[in-house]
């Protein structure tokens, strides 16, 4: 049998997994500092949830879902995204008041795999539920900016307003009338999208030159949407956060109203450059059958971010414990335990190999120091220095030395 993972999926293993670990830790710490509690929802949900929430006419629902019938005859789908699941969970909990939640986990979309576009990919994301305040939109954007800063990757914030249930229908009829006049020249993809998802036609790179004079949502917003959009933009400007308005920014999921944004990589040369995307979804709760509840949030693709990130591989081990004659791997485990308790990273070789081979392992691991355990006690070797110590002194001595 083949040991390769299924097409479009990856094994994320050391040493490549080290930046993953750091990024997930950074996300966790940041989200917690911003007051977002952890939410864990099922990796699979009733198919219905995504058909209604994400939208039957979207590519995600039409072409990309992993859907199957379970042994109880229910139609189940591996989550292609997590906003619908989080909203479902919020409604299951009563759907009242403000809730700020953060998540991290795998999502599944049957896409044509390429760099940064996987069939199983990892998202981290936040949802700010229960408020229409534009300041909530802005707070999620500030958090996104901080998170991508921690990921050491330059991006540009692209912003748009998609209107709401009041102004968008009128705009869509205008857009449809306009697109009908271009029908003969549209590409096949756009023609297929035209009846159900005309906004996506605006997004088509092939048809873009034909559509330069298309009517844009931003010019047809109703007064409350204008007010909301202005409040978001003013707050961003006041906080010194640069953004570029793009009236053609359309997101691939149907639930968005008003604010839509993406952080796009300015360095990636692959086709997939949107590292993080999100927006407001005040109609989602009702679409999935609940009472109205507004919300705003974003999700970022960890696989994609790490393609663009300057984050380096594993930080070197603080100490590698080598045992000489008369000392056993169990002694090394004990000493490594002392170092680990002191917050240092430490490792050793468990099989009682030769001293020479243990030193080779220490070197291979790039250890910052080596601790040699013999019947006489411990000797720490670091940066060409040697210090003879009692085993119980090593952790304190090394902590001071490594921090200094
Ligand atoms: P999305 O734009 O579909 O939005 O995905 C968000 C991010 O997930 C993308 O910017 C990208 O980095 C990553 N991503 C998406 N598909 C793939 C893929 N096939 N392979 C690798 N990475 C991928 C959502 O999912 C919304 N739920 C975001 C949201 C949260 N909106 C409001 N709250």
Image: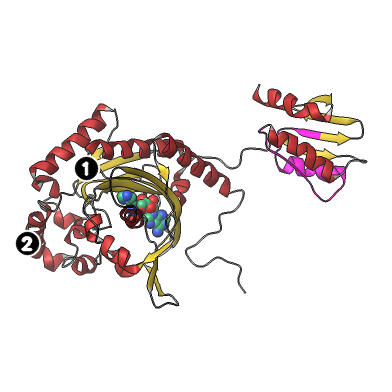
Q: Residue furthest front?
A: 94
Front disc: 1 or 2: 1
Residue position for label 1: 132
**Can the viewer see residue 378?**
yes
The residue that appears at 87% across and 44% down in the rendered structure is 328
Q: Which structural element holds mark 2?
A: helix
Q: Quadrant of the C terminus?
A: top right
| Number of marks drawn | 2
Left/right of residue 335 with respect to residue 213 in the rendered view? right
Span highlighted in magenta in the image: 343-371
Residue position for label 2: 177
Above or below, comparing residue 31 to residue 173 in the picture: above
Task: State the image coordinates of residue 350 (x, y, percent, origin top left).
Answer: 80, 49
Categorize mark 1 by other alpha carbons within 10 Å: few (<14), some (14-19), many (20+): some
First along the sequence among labels 1 and 2? 1
**Residues under numbered marks 1 and 2 in contact, where contact means CB atoms less than 8 Å apart:** no
Task: State the image coordinates of residue 376 (x, y, percent, origin top left).
Answer: 91, 31
Magenta segment includes 348: yes
The residue that appears at 24% across and 66% down in the rendered structure is 57
Q: Residue furthest top?
A: 404
**Can the viewer see residue 271?**
no
């Amino acid at each position: 049998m083949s040991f390769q993972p299924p097409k479009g999926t990856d094994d994320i293993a050391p040493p490549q997994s080290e930046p993953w670990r750091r990024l997930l830790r950074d996300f966790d710490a940041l989200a917690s500092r911003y007051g977002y509690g952890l939410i864990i929802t099922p990796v699979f949900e009733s198919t219905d949830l995504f058909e209604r929430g994400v939208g039957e006419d979207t590519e995600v629902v039409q072409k990309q879902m992993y859907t199957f019938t379970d042994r109880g005859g229910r139609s189940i789908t591996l989550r292609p995204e997590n906003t619908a699941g989080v909203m479902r969970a919020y409604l299951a909990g009563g759907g009242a008041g403000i809730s700020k939640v953060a998540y991290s986990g795998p999502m599944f979309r049957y896409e044509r795999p390429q760099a940064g576009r996987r069939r199983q990919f990892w998202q981290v994301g936040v949802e700010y539920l229960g408020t229409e305040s534009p300041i909530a939109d802005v707070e999620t954007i500030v958090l996104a900016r901080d998170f991508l800063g921690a990921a050491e990757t330059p991006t540009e914030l692209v912003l748009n307003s998609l209107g709401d249930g009041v102004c968008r229908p009128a705009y869509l009829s205008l857009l449809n009338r306009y697109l009908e006049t271009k029908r003969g020249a549209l590409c096949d993809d756009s023609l297929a999208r035209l009846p159900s998802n005309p906004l996506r036609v605006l997004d088509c790179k092939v048809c873009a030159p034909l559509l330069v004079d298309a009517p844009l949502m931003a010019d047809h917003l109703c007064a409350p949407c204008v007010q909301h959009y202005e409040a978001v933009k003013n707050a961003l400007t006041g906080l010194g956060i640069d953004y570029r308005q793009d009236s053609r920014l359309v997101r691939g999921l149907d639930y968005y109203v008003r604010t839509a944004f993406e952080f796009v990589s300015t360095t990636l040369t692959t086709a997939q450059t949107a590292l993080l995307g999100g927006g407001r979804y005040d109609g989602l709760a009702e679409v999935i059958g609940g009472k109205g509840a507004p919300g705003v949030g974003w999700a970022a693709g960890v696989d994609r971010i790490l393609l663009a990130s300057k984050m380096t591989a594993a930080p070197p081990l603080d100490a590698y414990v080598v045992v000489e004659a008369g000392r056993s791997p169990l002694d090394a485990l004990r000493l490594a335990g002392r170092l680990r308790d002191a917050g240092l990273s430490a490792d050793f070789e468990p099989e009682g190999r030769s001293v020479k081979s243990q030193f080779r392992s220490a070197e291979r691991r790039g250890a910052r120091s080596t601790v040699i355990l013999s019947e006489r006690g411990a000797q720490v070797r670091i940066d060409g220095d040697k210090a003879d110590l009692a085993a119980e002194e090593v952790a304190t001595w090394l902590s001071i030395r490594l921090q200094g």
